Image (cartoon, helix red, strand yellow):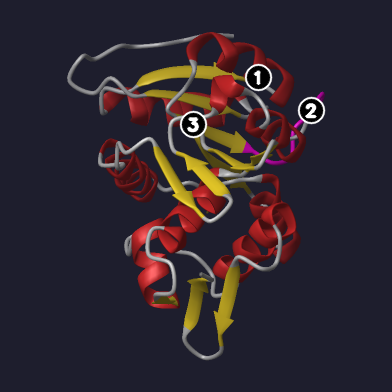
Amino acid sequence: MLNKKINMENPYKILVVDDEDDILEFIEYNLQKEGYEVHLAHNGQEAITIGKKIKPDLVLLDVMMPVMDGIEACKLMKSDKSFSKSFIIFLTARSEEYSEIAGFNAGADDYIAKPIKPRVLLSRLSAILRRKNKEIVESKLTVGDLIIDRETFLVYRGDHKIQLARKEFELLYLLAGKPGKVFTREHILEKVWGDDVLVVDRTIDVHIRKIREKIGDEYIGTVKGVGYKFEI
């Protein structure tokens, strides 16, 4: 299923993925009122097919769905260049810690619990898309033996290409931009997530752990009680 409404004053494309028609209609109605171009899908597999065609700016992705759930869909999206510039936000009625950690591990940028409140949803989307609009356009950052490419959201270590989730990439880019500088947890949250986006205390730790797993432990140092730094 593919629905859309285009407003040239608000050209962002949002892909909404949920297996419940009433939720799709509810979100579509509220997003279209704001002028977003809205596309709909009922499961992860359908979302990937549609996303490859439209290259969405943002994906609202339910966790529990038939055919292909949100966690698996997110992992596949993160490995597909059609979604390289897409933010991914999970929608889920599950409040258990598992859902949030699994979502972040899969590469999600944010997490919104159901029932969805239109004002909260629109505020979060607006904040995220504002940050997208203000992203630094410098294409590559070279630090030591790492090349961090903002155009492709890829990291290169020698001949090895490393795929990071969006927030992992932005966090690494922030730290690597000023090697040796200690970034407090508060500063990291403000610069990477924004002070108007609610995240839990362990969010930074989860992302740092995933970055270390992918690029190696030696690049990011922990300053106990303060924050993190990129090791020179």
In the rendered image, residue 107 lying in the magenta stretch gets the answer no
Q: Magenta includes 63?
A: yes
Main secondary-structure element of the magenta-colored stretch:
loop
Q: Mark 3 falls on what kind of element? A: loop
Please tell me which of labels 2 and 1 falls first in the chain: 1
Residue 110 shows in the view: no
| In contact (CB < 8 Å): disc 3 and disc 2 | no
Earlier in the chain: of badge 1 and badge 3, it is 1
* Rendered location of residue 141, percent (x, y): 42, 46
Q: Is residue 88 visible?
A: yes
Please name the residue that numbered disc 1 is placed on: 48
Query: Residue 215 appears in which quarter of the rendering?
Result: bottom right
In the picture of the structure, the residue carrying the numbered disc 2 is 68
Q: CA distance from mark 1 to mark 3?
A: 12 Å
The reply to whether discs 2 and 1 touch (Cβ–Cβ < 8 Å) is: yes
> Cα distance, mark 2 to mark 1?
10 Å
Q: Nearer the viewer, residue 91 or 200?
A: 200
Q: Nearer the viewer, residue 46 or 140?
A: 140
| Label 2 element class | loop
Cβ atoms under marks 1 and 3 closer than 8 Å: no
Q: Which residue corresponds to mark 3? A: 86
Q: Quadrant of the N terminus?
A: top right
Q: Position of residue 28 (x, y in %)?
A: 43, 24
Which kind of residue does numbered mark 2 sit on? Answer: Met
Residue at the limit of the structure toward the left, as seen here: 9
Frontmost of labels 1 and 3 is 3
Left or right position of 72 against 206:
right
Residue 152 spot, x, y in % from top left: 50, 30
In the rendered image, residue 97, in percent from the top left (x then y), is placed at: 71, 65
**Which portion, as a residue range, is magenta?**
62-67
